[in-house]
Amino acid sequence: MYFTFFIGTFSQEKWSPTNPVRFIVLNLLITLIKTLGENDVGKVYEHIVNSSFRFNFSLDTSKNQPGDEEFEEWNERLKLLDYSIINLVGDKDFDILDLAEQIDIALQKSLFYKQIQEYENDTQLLFKKFVQKRAEYLWNKTTESTRKQLYLSGVNFDTIENYDSIIEEIFKIIKNIESILKASNIDKNQIILSINELAYKLFSINEFSPTHLPNNYNEILTNWLNGKRYLIDDEIDKTVRFIEHDVSYTLVWALEFLKSRHTICDKTEIEVETFDYISQALEYGLIDKCAISLMQQGIGSRLQAQELTDHLNFIDPKQIIKWISELNIDDIKNQFSAELINSLKKLLIKINPFKKKIRTLLIKEPVIWFVDDPDAYGFSGLKLINTDSETFILSNKTKVIGKFKKIIDIGSVNIEYMYINDDFTIEIQYEYFE
């Protein structure tokens, strides 16, 4: 069989969640075939079988060398294939001599195996051999500990293998935070300084490095952790992305990696609860454990959680939950804002769920749009955030695309759906309780 039809047809195939591994292997094979200048499936198969999988295209200038962009895509796809292989076998470990058989057994149970059945037998063998050879390369190149870290956390091998000194420094910072938390008087300012230092170190690891880091990110992160408003300049889009993606997602993911590495490497210096506490602080934008507990209960607004925590001045999160469970709203309605009172009513519903539920609509809420084509975001999973007494609209990519002309109390309602009308107003259906 020859590859002219293979390349011409399948290079047009698009990635989709239903065939990611086939897409990855297919595109890697196409790059390899083009570079070898070889269309005979048998010879390409032989090249893969005899290869150590250390393909270095730059060594042979007589071949069709991939350009920088294509070579970068090659490396990124190899990383995805590595992760797919490790996920395929799970956290099991095999002797290198048994690996080919174990990979074949795992492939037979996979969607990838079913999908390549549409190809001719020679091409199916090529796909499977490509995956098997990459697995052999991984087993020779990595340790069981490395593979388990990748399986449990999803980071790439570069992060696991090439940042040991930085990771050890990070563990020291986390241990310092643990010591502060165990002190009789917790120094919250010192915790915030330490988490800022932790973020700086994690951002120096390539996989966790932000694409666009705000110049004043330390100040933004400090305000975020203090439960304060964090929009401190006009760069709303960049600031919101930093908090929503780089802090609440990437740094939390990095903490999960560090926790799994700490466990797998049989370290015992740091308690699991310390990793979890830092992750929660980064995710919720609060360092007070009582305020974090309120967010987990569903109070909805970190500013409200911080306001209530500051007022009550409890130390143990159980105290504040007990206080809410025994609360009579009429006794405190003049002590707090209407928004906070509504949020407390919502928390009480969880304890007494037999109150009347009301579903209602905001049909044509006017919006100030920051994009030229708001209709393009109509079905993209819109999200609302309240900050600085305004309600902003985010796309599913955490891009700020607009804001409502009036603030919407999203902390006291349960939003069921939201979409953009033809006249670019927004319709929202939500629930609340009497």
Image (cartoon, grey):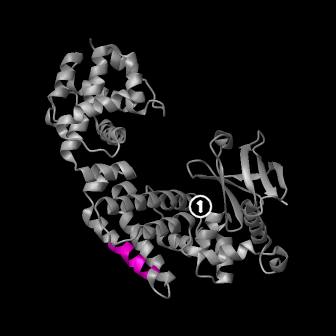
- The boundaries of the magenta stretch are 172-181
* Chief secondary structure of the magenta portion: helix
Which residue was labeled with disc 1?
236
Is label 1 in a helix, a strand or a loop?
helix
Residue 224 shows up from this direction: yes
Mark 1: few/some/many CA within 10 Å (<14, 14-19, 20+): some
- Residue in the image at 25% along x and 37% along y: 135
In magenta stretch: residue 162:
no
Relative depth, front residue between 64 and 316 = 316
Location of residue 239 (image quadrant): bottom right
Please state which of residues 187 and 425 is positioned toward the viewer in this rendering.
187
Relative height, residue 210 to residue 56 (above, below): below
Q: Is residue 286 above or below residue 313?
A: above
Q: Looking at the rendering, which quadrant does residue 107 occupy?
A: top left
Quadrant of the image for the C terminus?
A: bottom right
Give the residue furthest to the bottom. Answer: 185
- Judge by depth and name the residue closer to the eye, 342 or 226: 342
In the rendered image, residue 39, in percent from the top left (x then y), is placed at 24, 17
Q: Find residue 346 and report its horizontal and vertical position in percent.
A: 75, 63
The amino acid on which the numbered mark 1 sits, given as a three-letter code, is Ile
